[in-house]
Amino acid sequence: MAVGWIDIVVNNTDSAWHLKSVDDRHNGALKGGGDHFELDDKGFHQIRPRTQYDADWCGIPWYHQGKHYKSISKDKEKEVIFYTSWKDGKNWIMFEEGDTRRPLGRLQAPETDFHCYLRFELNDVIIDIVNDDGSTQKALTQIFDEVKGWIEVLAPLLAAKIKSASSK
């Protein structure tokens, strides 16, 4: 199970939006535009127009019996919920209508922990995945394996050179 961490929430519109978190941990805290609030109360919090918030410990919950999710709304009445879930052999951020749980869409997410931004735009709400913690590890593993291969080839050659130089 991979955790999606929201690092920044930004409202690029002229209208307020609302965000809530329903989870037993990692609900998060937001700070920006003179506001500071924690999402632990399972209630909606206003995301002011044209405002950016820094988020702390703001996880996108892993699906569990419909009781763990984040929710966005313009009017606090009609909401879209989202959460992460493993489905069809991949990790996804799933989006559903809040009252009917009708699927609205999904965004493929990394299989390891990742960081993202939540953006409110004029005609869309966007989650930008900005860092896949697993890709860094994969790259480092590949570099290590390649360096290890070169060392295995070069070490005997260097040892022979050193031995040859020291015997002169």
Image: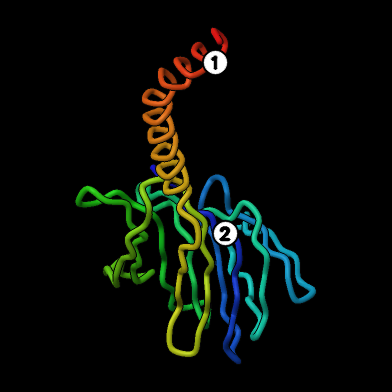
The image shows residue 49, relative to residue 130, as above or below, that is below
Specify few, some or many for label 1: CA neighbours under 10 Å numbering under 14, 14-19, or 20 or more: few
Farthest residue to the top: give it: 167
Q: Going 52% across and 80% down the picture, which residue do you hit?
A: 120
Q: Nearer the viewer, residue 142 or 99?
A: 142
Q: Nearer the viewer, residue 142 or 3?
A: 142
Query: Residue flagged by tag 1: what amino acid is it?
Result: Ala
For mark 1, give the secondary structure.
helix
Residue identified by numbered label 1 = 165
Residue 139: horizontal and vertical position, in percent?
Answer: 42, 45
For mark 2, give the secondary structure.
loop
Colouring style: rainbow
Farthest residue to the front: give it: 168
Residue identified by numbered label 2 = 42
Q: Going 47% across and 47% down the picture, which residue do you hit?
A: 136
The image shows residue 94, relative to residue 63, as above or below, that is below
Residue 5: horizontal and vertical position, in percent?
Answer: 53, 54
Specify few, some or many for label 2: CA neighbours under 10 Å numbering under 14, 14-19, or 20 or more: some
Q: Is residue 162 left or right of residue 88?
A: right
